[in-house]
Image (cartoon, rainbow, N blue to C red):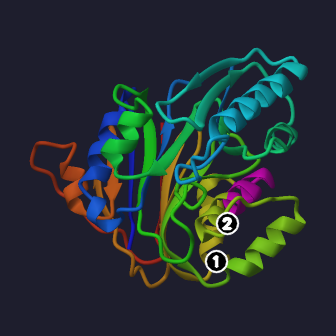
């Protein structure tokens, strides 16, 4: 079933960590397996990398901590070898990390270099994007990763009910559009031509961390924008190329967009004012952060909407 949520503040930053936690918590009945956030903080000259060195449900044998220590040292050494200034900060988990680096080179080369370390999986790279995802409900994940007080302008989130892949972090949403900076997607639905587009994008140099069709949407949109399309045009093109029943949200460094397929079977409720846009799978999630009377509406079939800062 799953649930998705998005918010954009066009009049300046807000505590989007708390807002997204509340919205996703109100929909945890739609997805008890994992929760994910794609949060956009203040743009930085540094590149922020979110990565994991193991999974939440990996076996905790006697060598687990030693393996993590070796992997963490190797990641640090690789970053230092390219001249990066490394600031390593971890969460309350044993396996998930956030690194700020001074780097202006090729993101594919950087990601591939890091993922040569056994167990390393890069979840996001960007100057303002940070993807945080793990097993459990939104309150659990937000507490583990200290998301209360995360100040930013826009975000998307996802609660997942696993149907076709394992319950692990790799199968959790959102998905970063490797290897493009500051682009992520959440999705409710199913693509029926998933394997066609996976093979096609792989021939263009993409790599995929999961078997989830949502990751295809992220990379597809980023590829189209790299060819010169703006976000809205790329999204409209996706409705012609991607088959299935779906509603997805996409975030870039300065925009939030949503698209629904031609049948519009997957729910989405939207609230819009001059400076605040909130959209979710259920209206209860909008009301989790807005305490006054509001009017909402449902986007139409094949509709594409984009808001920018």
Q: x and y percent of residue 297 in the render?
A: 26, 64
Q: 134 or 176: nearer the eye?
A: 134
Q: 252 or 37: nearer the eye?
A: 37
Task: State the mark number for residue 242.
Answer: 1
Q: Mark 2–mark 1 contact, CB under 8 Å?
A: yes
Mark 1 surroundings: few (<14), some (14-19) or many (≥20) residues within 10 A: many
Q: Viewed as shown, does residue 158 lie left or right of 138? A: right
Name the N-terminal-most of marks 2 and 1: 2
Q: Which residues are magenta?
A: 219-229
Question: Magenta span has 226?
Answer: yes
Mark 2 surroundings: few (<14), some (14-19) or many (≥20) residues within 10 A: many
Helix, strand or loop at label 2? It is helix
Helix, strand or loop at label 1? It is loop
Q: Viewed as shown, does residue 91 lie left or right of 159? A: right
Q: x and y percent of residue 194 in the render?
A: 67, 78
Labels in figure, total: 2
Where is mark 2, residue-wise?
A: 216
Q: Furthest residue to the front?
A: 62
């Amino acid at each position: 079933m799953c649930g998705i949520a998005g918010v954009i503040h066009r009049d300046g930053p807000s505590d989007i960590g708390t807002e997204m936690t509340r919205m996703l918590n109100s929909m945890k009945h739609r997805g008890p397996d994992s929760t994910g956030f794609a949060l956009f903080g203040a743009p930085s000259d540094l590149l922020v990398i979110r990565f994991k060195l193991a999974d939440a449900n990996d076996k905790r044998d006697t060598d687990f901590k030693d393996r993590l220590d070796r992997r963490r040292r190797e990641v640090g050494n690789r970053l230092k070898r390219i001249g990066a200034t490394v600031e390593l900060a971890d969460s309350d988990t044993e396996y998930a990390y956030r690194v700020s680096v001074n780097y202006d080179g090729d993101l594919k080369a950087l990601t591939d270099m890091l993922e040569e370390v056994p167990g390393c999986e890069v979840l996001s790279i960007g100057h303002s994007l940070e993807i945080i995802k793990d097993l459990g409900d939104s309150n659990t994940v937000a507490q583990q990763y200290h998301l209360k007080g995360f100040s930013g302008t826009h975000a998307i989130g996802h609660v997942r009910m696993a149907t076709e892949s394992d319950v692990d972090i790799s199968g959790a949403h959102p998905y970063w559009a490797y290897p493009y900076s500051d682009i992520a997607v959440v999705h409710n639905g199913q693509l029926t031509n998933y394997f066609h587009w996976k093979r096609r994008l792989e021939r263009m140099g993409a790599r995929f961390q999961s078997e989830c069709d949502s990751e295809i949407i992220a990379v597809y949109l980023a590829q189209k924008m790299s060819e010169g399309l703006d976000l809205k045009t790329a999204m409209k093109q996706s409705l012609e190329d991607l088959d299935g029943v779906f509603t997805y949200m996409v975030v870039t460094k300065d925009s939030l967009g949503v698209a629904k397929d031609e049948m519009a079977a997957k729910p989405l409720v939207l609230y819009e004012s001059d400076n605040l846009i909130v959209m979710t799978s259920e209206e209860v999630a909008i009301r989790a952060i807005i305490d006054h009377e509001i009017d909402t509406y449902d986007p139409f079939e094949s509709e594409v909407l984009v808001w920018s800062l």
